[in-house]
Image: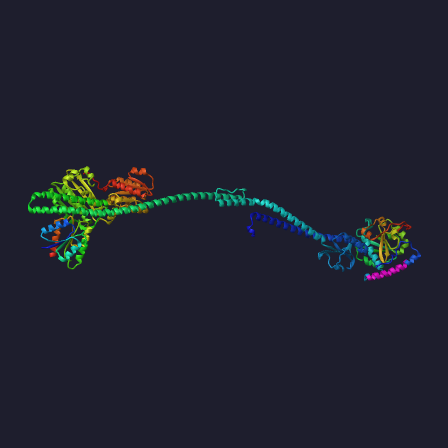
């Protein structure tokens, strides 16, 4: 049993007992020691005194050599029990008379006068040798011997007493200690109990009782404070735990939702892919199936016409020609419908190749010569010198041009149709500008609205009068879009119309990619409005991380994105590329977003550009007052941003810089 | 008189073209599927082949490839006739070895131009 | 060593007794001589008187004279011997160089007359046995320690009387005589002595 591990109570009591015992022991010992020493001293003094007295009393007897008298004197010593022997010696050292205590035999006493003087201790006897003199005259020597019985008995008595006293005191101390130790151990034990309770029940509301305002009291205070903190911590932990649990549940359900959404998306994708494939094969089949009979119709009617020419039965020629014409019309309708279907289905791909622009135009010119002459129109073709090469989908370019030209011819009588082709630089890219002007009937403002929409010719009667399917322009527009170009029209009824197509001299793969991406999303997306140069989004934000994020997100959504790191740069770029939409961060170094916004709105070229403020500063009213079209808070909700951008784009289907305006 | 082998599975197209070509003074051989077309080409060694692409038994590309890899028939100019108007078809045609191609619906005049060009070339 | 009966008996002296005592005295002398020979190397016939001398000295130590006994503080203690000096030179020997309370001890041999008064201790030799009363008369009232060695000396008024008994020297003390002489005898001495009451002049006091 290790001492260190005793209980506090035992320890305290042990300490007390030990302390008091040691103290008592020391006291007793020193007291005893001192006492016995001084008693011994006293005894020797006493014996010496006795010797003196006896000496004095026997001096005369010694002087007179009265042995009897001397003996009497000595015999009186019988009364003193501790005196063992008293011997008077004559001056010559011989024993004169003696007294020896009863029954005592000590051969050492039988001799001459001992050779010492004074007091000495020998063999636990106290011996005194005293010179006896009568009035200064030595008359003999007294030897007095005492046993130390007094001393021993005293020592014994005292020792026993002290022992008993010590024991008694110890006992008392024990009692007191055991009562008083509770002052210390009590609070500690209480504290221990409290601690056990706390840890066993995990109940942190319990508080330890404080008894006194001593160190233990402070310990208890500390303990209670700790408990409070633990309690707080615990409840904080609890609530954090709960929050975490809730969050986890939320996350789990969100994950579940996402999974479900993902699964749905996957199946939708598969469905879409299937649908897409179905569409492709349908279109391919339809294309073939529809054309084949028509082929026959047109072909045979041509043949019939030839034979009629040969046989000379001219009256049937008109009929046959009508068949032909109807067939050709049907064919072009079918072609147009199939084209549009393809475009709608996102199956219209671009096949890029480089070709000589001038050459291509020249080749084409001959094909619509008949249409020109039909309406007695004059054709003017102006090709710039530096047209050079173009990289685009030739077939489509041809189709666009043919469409424009035939429209021009169709709606002009005795007028001039001119085709201008130029190479221009806009932004940082090179463009080919194809412009078809006519001096025809023109298009009213009302009609201009629906110009590029399918199935709407200016007027139902027009298609009857002028022919055509009404789909041509829509297809041309779409083709131009596909290639990253844009289409504009100006017209004044009665005066004529001008149709301008800008096509990039190098139709870029990005565009094609973006288009392809959009095409693949076919059924899920709207009519593919691929990101074109006109649909560039300018992102102005000083945070590179934000810029990167926005860029990637918007590109993924099919836009063309340009980024700027500060307001000045952003304004420069905006002026240059005329973006479709600007997203603007407010808090930037240099000029802040508000200032940029002001300047945008103040610039006539940019004023119409929708600006979406993207920022952490919550000041929607200010933004709206300044004309920011919309306002989103960081962190940006991607879907929200995309929706906003889409909204703006749809609101203005054409490029912001070329707005159809009635001239 | 030049001989043209027409490989076309559609009856009406076949009929139209044959008659019109004959009118133009060509001798017209007809095959109705790819295998037949190949056989006739090897046997008759025509002056020109009009090859429809979508053929049963063997499609036009295959036949063209076979003919173009055959020493005996390599020299025969082949014009592919395709209903598809994709540029990729044009490429495919030239890849297979066609000398030219034309799209349906056929513009007879246009086709004639191509035929004549090729025959002239061949002659020279 | 037992000594024979002391020559200083208390009975009245008669012729036979005198002779007997004389013989006894001789014997005693012889015994004493023998004894003193056995006891001390300085044996002399006067060992008895050696002892008496010693005793006398001791007496001097153990008594107190009144203040008027000495003229001056350093006056010596005069021991007068009247009669035949039995000590020989032993008293001188014993007293040589000694003092009592700082007083020297001077021995004087006294003649009859006023000499007797001029001492502090008067030793009455046995030769003067017949003149004892006369002596007492002379020194009556004077602070003189009278020492004798004849029987009844003390009874008759002497203060101290030597007795020889069994060859041992004893002494008697007459306390009243001491009182008369204004001499204080230490109890120590008294305890060793035989106290003798005074007898009337005819010495008829009972023992």
A186 vs A487, nearest the viewer: A186
Side (left or right) of A45 relative to A357: right
- Rendering coords of residue C40 (x, y %): 81, 61
Q: Quadrant of the N terminus of chain C?
A: bottom right
Q: Is residue A172 visible?
A: yes
- Rendering coords of residue B93 (x, y %): 18, 53
Residue C22 among magenta residues = yes
Q: Residue furthest right?
A: C15
- Rendering coords of residue A114 (x, y %): 74, 59
- Rendering coords of residue B100 (x, y %): 15, 53
Q: Number of marks in the image? A: 0
A635 vs C199, nearest the viewer: A635
Residue A648 placement: quadrant? top left
Q: Is residue C45 visible?
A: no
Side (left or right) of A605 relative to C69: left
Q: Magenta segment, principal secondary structure?
A: helix
Residue span colored magenta: C21-38
- The colour mode here is rainbow
Side (left or right) of A555 relative to C84: left
| A567 to A95, vertically: above or below | above
Q: Residue furthest left?
A: A312
Residue C161 placement: quadrant? bottom right
| C34 to B8, vertically: above or below | below
Residue C119 among magenta residues = no
């Amino acid at each position: 049993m290790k001492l260190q591990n005793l209980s506090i109570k035992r320890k305290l009591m042990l300490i007390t007992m030990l302390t008091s015992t040691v103290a008592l022991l020391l006291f007793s010992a020193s007291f005893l020691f001192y006492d016995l020493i001084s008693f011994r001293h006293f005894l020797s003094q006493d014996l010496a005194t006795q010797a003196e007295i006896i000496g004095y009393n026997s001096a005369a007897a010694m002087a007179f050599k009265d042995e009897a008298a001397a003996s009497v004197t000595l015999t009186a010593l019988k009364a003193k029990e501790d005196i063992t022997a008293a011997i008077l010696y004559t001056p010559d050292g011989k024993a004169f008379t003696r007294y020896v205590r009863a029954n005592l035999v000590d051969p050492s006493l039988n001799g001459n006068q001992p050779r010492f003087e004074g007091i000495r201790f020998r063999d636990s006897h106290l011996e005194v040798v005293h010179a006896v003199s009568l009035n200064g005259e030595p008359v003999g020597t007294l030897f007095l011997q005492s046993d130390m019985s007094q001393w021993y008995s005293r020592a014994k008595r005292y020792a026993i007493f002290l022992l008993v006293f010590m024991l008694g005191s110890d006992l008392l101390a024990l009692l007191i200690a055991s009562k008083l130790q509770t002052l210390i151990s009590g609070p500690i034990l209480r504290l221990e109990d409290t601690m056990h309770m706390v840890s066993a029940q995990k109940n942190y509301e319990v508080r330890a009782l404080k008894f006194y305002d001593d160190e233990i009291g402070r310990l208890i205070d500390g303990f209670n404070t700790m408990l409070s903190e633990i309690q707080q911590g615990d409840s904080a932990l609890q609530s954090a735990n709960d929050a975490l649990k809730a969050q986890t549940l939320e996350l789990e359900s969100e994950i579940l939702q996402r999974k479900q959404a993902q699964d749905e998306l996957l199946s939708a994708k598969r469905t879409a892919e299937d649908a897409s494939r179905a569409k492709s094969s349908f279109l391919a089949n339809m294309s073939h199936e529809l054309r084949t009979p028509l082929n026959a119709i047109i072909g045979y009617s041509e043949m019939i016409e030839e034979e009629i020419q040969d046989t000379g039965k001219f009256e049937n020629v008109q009929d046959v020609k009508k068949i032909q014409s109807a067939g050709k019309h049907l064919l072009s309708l079918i072609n147009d419908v199939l084209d549009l279907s393809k475009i709608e289905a996102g199956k219209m791909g671009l096949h890029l190749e480089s070709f000589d622009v001038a050459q291509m135009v020249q080749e084409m010119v001959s094909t619509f010569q008949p249409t020109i002459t039909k309406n007695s129109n004059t054709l003017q073709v102006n090709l710039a010198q530096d047209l050079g090469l173009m990289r685009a989908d030739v077939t489509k370019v041809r189709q666009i041009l043919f469409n424009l030209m035939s429209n021009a011819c169709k709606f002009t009588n005795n007028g001039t149709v001119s085709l201008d082709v130029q190479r221009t630089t806009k932004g940082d890219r090179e463009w080919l500008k194809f412009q078809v002007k006519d001096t025809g009937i023109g298009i009213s403002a009302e009609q201009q609205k629906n110009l590029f929409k399918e199935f709407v010719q200016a007027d139902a009667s027009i298609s009857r009068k002028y022919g055509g399917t009404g789909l041509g322009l829509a297809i041309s527009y779409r083709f131009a879009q596909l290639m990253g170009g844009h289409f504009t029209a100006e017209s004044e009824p009665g005066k004529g119309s001008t149709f301008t197509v800008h096509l990039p001299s190098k139709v870029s793969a990005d565009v094609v990619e973006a288009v392809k991406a959009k095409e693949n999303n076919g059924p899920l997306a709207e009519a593919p409005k691929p990101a074109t140069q006109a649909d560039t989004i300018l992102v102005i934000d000083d945070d590179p991380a934000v810029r990167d994020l926005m860029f990637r997100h918007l590109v993924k959504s099919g836009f063309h994105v340009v980024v700027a790191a500060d307001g000045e740069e952003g304004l420069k770029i905006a002026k240059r590329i005329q973006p479709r939409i600007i997203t603007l961060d407010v808090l930037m170094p240099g000029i802040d977003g508000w200032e940029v916004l002001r300047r945008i709105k103040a610039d006539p070229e940019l004023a119409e550009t929708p600006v979406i403020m993207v920022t952490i500063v919550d000041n929607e009213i200010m933004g709206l007052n300044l004309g920011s079209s919309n306002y989103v808070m960081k962190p940006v909700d991607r879907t929200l941003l995309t929706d906003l951008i889409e909204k703006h784009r749809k609101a203005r289907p054409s490029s912001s810089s070329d707005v159809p305006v009635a001239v | 008189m030049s001989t043209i082998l027409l490989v076309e599975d559609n009856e009406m197209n076949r009929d139209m073209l044959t008659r019109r070509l004959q009118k133009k003074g060509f001798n017209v051989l007809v095959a109705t599927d790819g295998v037949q077309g190949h056989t006739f080409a090897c046997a008759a060694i025509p002056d020109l082949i009009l090859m429809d692409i979508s053929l049963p038994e063997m499609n036009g590309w295959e036949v063209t490839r076979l003919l173009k890899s055959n020493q005996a028939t390599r020299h025969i100019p082949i014009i592919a006739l395709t209903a598809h108007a994709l540029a990729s078809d044009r490429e495919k045609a030239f890849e297979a070895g066609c000398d030219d191609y034309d799209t349906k619906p056929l513009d007879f005049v246009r086709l004639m131009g191509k035929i004549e060009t090729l025959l002239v070339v061949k002659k020279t | 060593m037992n000594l024979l009966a002391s020559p200083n008996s208390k009975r009245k002296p008669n012729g036979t007794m005198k002779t007997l005592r004389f013989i006894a005295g001789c014997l005693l002398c012889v015994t004493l001589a023998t004894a003193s020979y056995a006891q001390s190397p300085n044996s002399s016939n006067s060992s008895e008187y050696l002892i008496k001398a010693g005793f006398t000295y001791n007496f001097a130590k153990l008594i107190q004279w009144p203040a008027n006994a000495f003229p001056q503080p350093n006056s010596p203690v005069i021991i007068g011997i009247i009669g035949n000096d039995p000590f020989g030179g032993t008293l001188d020997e014993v007293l040589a160089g000694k003092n009592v309370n700082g007083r020297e001890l001077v021995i004087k041999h006294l003649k009859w007359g006023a000499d007797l008064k001029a001492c502090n201790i008067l030793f009455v030799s046995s030769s003067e046995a017949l003149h004892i009363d006369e002596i007492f008369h002379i020194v009556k009232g004077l602070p003189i320690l009278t020492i004798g060695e004849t029987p009844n000396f003390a009874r008759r008024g002497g203060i101290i009387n030597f007795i020889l008994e069994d060859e041992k020297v004893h002494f008697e003390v007459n306390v009243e005589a001491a009182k008369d002489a204004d001499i204080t005898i230490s109890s120590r001495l008294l305890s060793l002595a035989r106290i003798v009451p005074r007898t009337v002049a005819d010495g008829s006091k009972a023992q």
